[in-house]
Each structure stands twice: as structure tokens, then as C-alpha cells.
Image: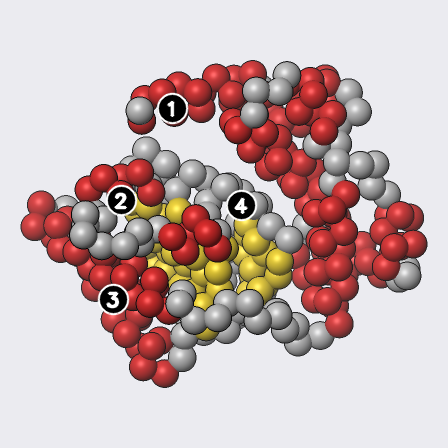
Amino acid sequence: MSTQHQISLPYTMGTSSDFSAQIPYHTHFHYEIYYFHAGKVNYLINDRIHVLEPGDLLLMHGMTLHRANVDPSEEYVRSILHFDPFYFKQFIQPLFAADLLEPFQKLQNVRLQLRGSEKAEVEEILLKLGQLYDQQDPFSQQRFQARMLDLLILINQHCQKPLNEKPTFPSSKEQHVQAIISYIELHYGEDITLEGIQTELHLSKFYLAKTFKEVTGSTIFQFLMLRRIYQAKIDLIDSGKPITEVGYEVGFKHPSHFSRAFKLHTELTPEQYRKQHQLLSAGQQ
């Protein structure tokens, strides 16, 4: 079963299995619960790399840049639940309960490593959610929302555990790519070159370029471009800065280049993007 995720829906649910799922870096306004069943995947969330293991559950604040880099030699199986946080708070979150969206809002992006009975419990909930989601009658939809509420309560319980453990990597390659991503995170608004990264990390620029592509599935400069566009999206929505200033601050030297690159990746000009989300925000008030 494979489900297309549409931002117009309050929630979408799907489990899919394939050998060739290569999804580009993306952002969305829905919150995301991602559960990894099987395969070999490096999951990149903003400036962190997660080498996934079966039973890993990711919570993602959708506006964070993310993607899965999948090894096509192994079957890739995952379950994904996208939901509108505004809808959840208005129609699913009980008035008497604590804020169940707190892990998404305060931690933003969390990896929970579920094993044993905890893993089995979450997989049982996801299986039932998938079955109910595929049934379109009103009772199944109500039961889906009840199960979704149960899942969010369980997730909040797991999020009480310490989440400040340092990420571990199986090889030096992931460590080097992590260093590149961290460098980009600090300097994406500046003029970044391979020579500059080479000097900073004391590694050959040829090795760095090859390793980054191997681990992430994209080039260093493709990632840099998407990081700049991602930051521009946030600034266009959250600040009243002139569009030209937003472009300069995220690393574009010329307004025309910023406008072309932004439209290439979003199908909207910066002006159209800002206006669209001002209208969306006004509609939710």
C-alpha cells in the first residue's frame, strides 16, 4: 500500500515497500511520524544523519529539511503518518490532556529507538491505523482518530526518556558527512567552496565530494542550495524583511538568482510564496 501525502488533508497514513524509493529533500507544514520497518537507510534531518535500524521512530516538525537516502539493494519498508497540528489540537486533542504536540514543538526532530515489546506495541497500532485509514466510512474515521490519539499519548510517554544521547555512526564516512552538514549549517549564508570545506575539515575535497554523494544521495552544493531555499521559506513566512534582504541573508549574491532558484525548487516566486502563506495563515485565524 502506498499513499500520496497531500497538504490539504488533515492527516494521511500509509505503509509502503519498494526497492527504489529516492525522495528528494523536502519540507511540509504537517507534522510527521515516520516508522522504519526494514531496509538500509541514512535519514537526514536538517543537520543530523540517522543511520536507521528496524524499530526506529522519527518525529519531525515538517518545516525541517529532511529526506531518506535509500540503499536500493535492500527492500525499504516504512510507515508514515502526516497530520495537521492545527486540526489535531482542535478536533482530536482532549481538553483535559497535556499538550500532546509538545515533543514536536520543543524537540522538533526526535529519534526513538523502540525494541522488544515497545516495538511490537507501536507496530500493532500502526497496522490497525493503516487498516482503518483504508476504510472510508465515518465509524472507521472516528476509530482512526482514537487510535491516533493513543499513539500520540504513547509517543509522549517515550519522549519523557532522556533524548540527549550523542548520535553514533558505523563508519568514518558518516562522521565526515556529518561534519560537512554541520559546517553548512553554520555557514550557509556565506560563500562556501570545496576548498574552504577542505581547509576546515583537513580532508581532500575530492574525497569529501565523493563521500557526501555516496552517503546522502546528493552533492554538497545541491544540499547547500536546498538549505538556503529552506531557510528562505522560513524567513519569508516568519519575518517582514524585504525579499531582496532575505535572499542576501541566506547566501544569494543576486536577487535574480534568488528568484530563479526559489521558483525552480518551489514552483513559486518568493513574492508568491509569501503571499500564499499569508492567506493560509489568515484563513486559520
Disc 2 marks a residue whose amino acid type is Phe
Q: Residue at x 50, y 41 (%)?
A: 63
Disc 1 marks a residue whose amino acid type is Leu
Q: Quadrant of residue 264?
A: top right
Q: Disc 4, disc 3: CB below 8 Å?
A: no
Colouring convention used in this rendered image of the protein:
secondary structure
Q: Which residue is mark 1?
A: 280
Specify whether 23 is left or right of 132.
right
Please state the horizontal and vertical placement of residue 240, each as a whole percent of the image.
57, 20
Element class at badge 3: helix
| N-terminal-most mark, 2 or 3 | 2
Please tell me whether residue 172 is drawn above or below residue 94 in the rendered image.
below
Q: Residue at x 89, y 48 (%)?
A: 196
Please tell me whether residue 52 is drawn above or below residue 236 in the rendered image.
below
Specify whether 168 is left or right of 34.
right
| N-terminal-most mark, 4 or 1 | 4
155 or 178, nearer to the observer: 155
Please state the horizontal and vertical placement of residue 164, each as a whole percent of the image.
55, 67
Q: Gap between marks 4 and 1, in whole Å?
A: 19 Å
Element class at badge 4: loop
Checking the image for residue 64, the label placed there is 4
Q: Disc 2, disc 4: CB below 8 Å?
A: no
Is residue 285 visible to us here?
A: yes
Q: Disc 4, disc 1: CB below 8 Å?
A: no
Q: Gap between marks 2 and 3, in whole Å?
A: 18 Å
Q: Which residue is mark 2?
A: 88
